[in-house]
Amino acid sequence: MPETRAELPRRIPVLIVGAGPVGLALAAELGWRGVPCLVVEQGDRSNEIPRTNAVGVRTMEFCRRWGIADLVRNAGFPPDYPHDFVYVTSITGHEIARVNRPTHGGVKPSPVSPERAQRCNQLWFDPILRDLASGFPSVALHYWSRFESFEESDNGVVADITDVKTGRRVRVAADYLVACCGGRSSIRDQLDIKMEGIGVHDYPVNVSLDVKNLTSFHDKGRVAMFYIVGSQGVLSTLESQDGADHWRLSVVGGSKPMDVAAFDVDAALLRAFGAKIPYSLRNIVSWTRRSLVAQRYGGPRVFLAGDSAHQNPPDGGGGMNTGIGDAVDLGWKLEAMVKGWGGPNLLASYNIERQPVGILSVAASTRMMQRRVLAPEASICEQGEAGEHSREKLRQTIMGSGSLFNADKVGLGYCYEASPVCCPDGTPVPEDGPDYVPSTRPGARAPHAWLRDGRSILDLFGRSFVLLRLGVDAPEGRAFSEAARARAVPLETVAIVEPEIRALYHSPLVLVRPDGHVAWRGDALPRDALAVIDRIRGAALPA
Ligand SMILES: Cc1cc2nc3c(=O)[nH]c(=O)nc-3n(C[C@H](O)[C@H](O)[C@H](O)COP(=O)(O)OP(=O)(O)OC[C@H]3O[C@@H](n4cnc5c(N)ncnc54)[C@H](O)[C@@H]3O)c2cc1C
């Protein structure tokens, strides 16, 4: 049971509303940075029906930084369990197509990251994050504490919080408030920020169930997710939750919410299984599939993160992962403000950097969702030649759309192009392609490479800005360290001699931000290093 400390602090630098994965990730990131924060959660999350399974590659890189990557890797699926998706007429029926996902799961090294995407259901992932966050002395985590409303001034916010168990209400003053309170955020409403996009695709029903040794009933082997196809297209998905007996059937919905009480679970499972297979039911829920992004992510004192800011269709597993990216972008900027070295424009860059990522991520999930809109021929489930022909035709359609969701591209490939706190180097925007291309273009995630000592170069980033001096004849970087010292900006200089990393990193000097994105790069020191430091800490507006 989550710990609740007795007294709420009455003054705190950062107040976080919601202890879902995004609120917990933000608390962990701030705790890791030693920034005091308070998380209030209206319940204890025990009634939460777990949704997320897919922990993306970038989230795993953050988990690596926080020291919990092994815990996540070992808490979800068995490491050797394949992450494959298989399209079938039923799990005991015909196999139509198999999408192998070789960069997901397991421990085999990826060429572009020291980590690999994993499957770790929220059942395990959230408690790992919660234990991490609550282990930091600067983090106070209060369950059964409901945020009611706030008043914002130039200096901060004052929020009313109710102790749900006693009804007692207290006022908490904070410098910054972050809404991690999910899709129905009352903070977003109070800021009068509208969501844009598609409010309802459909109203699916999720059935969580246990089936003892399901693989022994069919011939498809170990599969992460089955797409069950009928002549109308994809009818449902059956997704493993733990690489063992726990499964979730997600039945595609209509344009009206389904009546869960009247939902015929036996019939839906019989259609998916294609045979009578014994199961025990955990729960049934109806939910809404949406593609929405907030018009803006807030500021100057109140910010939206996670589902408060964007709601992805779950396809491709983008929602939580994008939200955790929001948390990491905010984390170092809040640290900079609380510790006094952040400039007045730094937090405005949160919206400018993250809202386009929300739009990209929701668009990618929506494209992935459209894979469900298949138009099979009427004979798709039939035995014999006509059926075989329909299945082959559909297989070609599915495999032809294989690049719709390239997880590395979605998770690692975005660049904060318009950021006012990154310094463009004048090179043209590269052409957009389907694959992730490592880049040190200012705004991009600094690419992974293995150092000679066995660490990833990513292991150097996080605590401070890092000036990389790449190659044996890299210019010295003293002007940057002196400028950073003058502004109390934490900056470390690291020499990298590996020639292959010098080649990968494009320039001999690359300045990387605490979130691992490139702030500046050049062949020589800039004429005015102080001006660069002022810009990347948000103290100077771009010329
Ligand atoms: C079926 C399904 C499968 C999914 N699978 C994936 C996946 O595999 N990978 C992925 O990345 N995403 C997935 N998603 C999306 C993912 O679930 C969400 O993006 C993610 O849970 C959002 O996290 P959050 O912390 O922003 O919000 P939430 O998880 O909604 O948490 C918000 C919290 O705020 C609390 N709260 C709300 N109001 C208040 C208040 N006034 N005071 C105090 N507390 C409050 C709530 O009680 C709640 O605990 C899936 C979604 C669905 C529907």
Image (cartoon, rainbow, N blue to C red):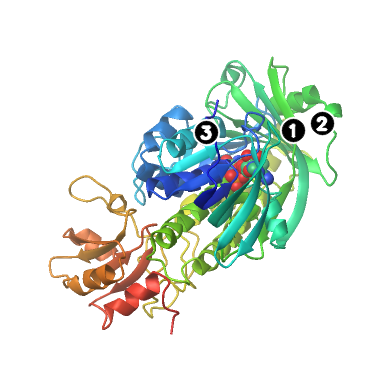
Looking at the image, is mark 3 or mark 1 nearer the viewer?
3
Q: Is residue 318 left or right of residue 187?
A: left
User: What residue is rendered at 28% in x and 53% in y?
Assistant: 460
Which of marks 1 and 2 precedes in the sequence? 2
Q: Point out residue 531 in the picture as x, y percentages from the top left corner.
A: 33, 79
User: What residue is rendered at 72% in x and 62% in y?
Assistant: 194
Identify the image quadrant of the N terminus: top right
Residue at numbered disc 2:
260
- Secondary structure of residue under mark 3: loop
Please tell me which residue lies in front, 209 or 338.
338
Q: Is residue 445 left or right of residue 398?
A: left
Counting other residues with Cα less than 10 Å from the Cα at mark 3, is it few (<14), some (14-19), or many (20 or more)? few
- Secondary structure of residue under mark 2: helix
Residue at numbered disc 1:
285
Tell me, yes or no, if residue 210 can be seen here.
yes
Separation of marks 2 and 3 at Cα, in angstroms: 37 Å
Identify the image quadrant of the C terminus: bottom left
Looking at the image, is mark 2 or mark 3 nearer the viewer?
3
Residue at numbered disc 3:
5
Separation of marks 2 and 1 at Cα, in angstroms: 7 Å
- Secondary structure of residue under mark 1: strand
Residue 307 vs 100, above or below: the answer is: below
User: Hey, what amino acid is under mark 1?
Assistant: Val
User: What residue is rendered at 33% in x and 42% in y?
Assistant: 109
Ligand 1 lies under 8 Å from the Cβ of mark 2:
no
Q: Point out residue 338 in the picture as x, y percentages from the top left corner.
A: 43, 59
User: Hey, what amino acid is under mark 3?
Assistant: Arg
Tell me, yes or no, if residue 57 can be seen here.
no
User: Hey, what amino acid is under mark 2?
Assistant: Val
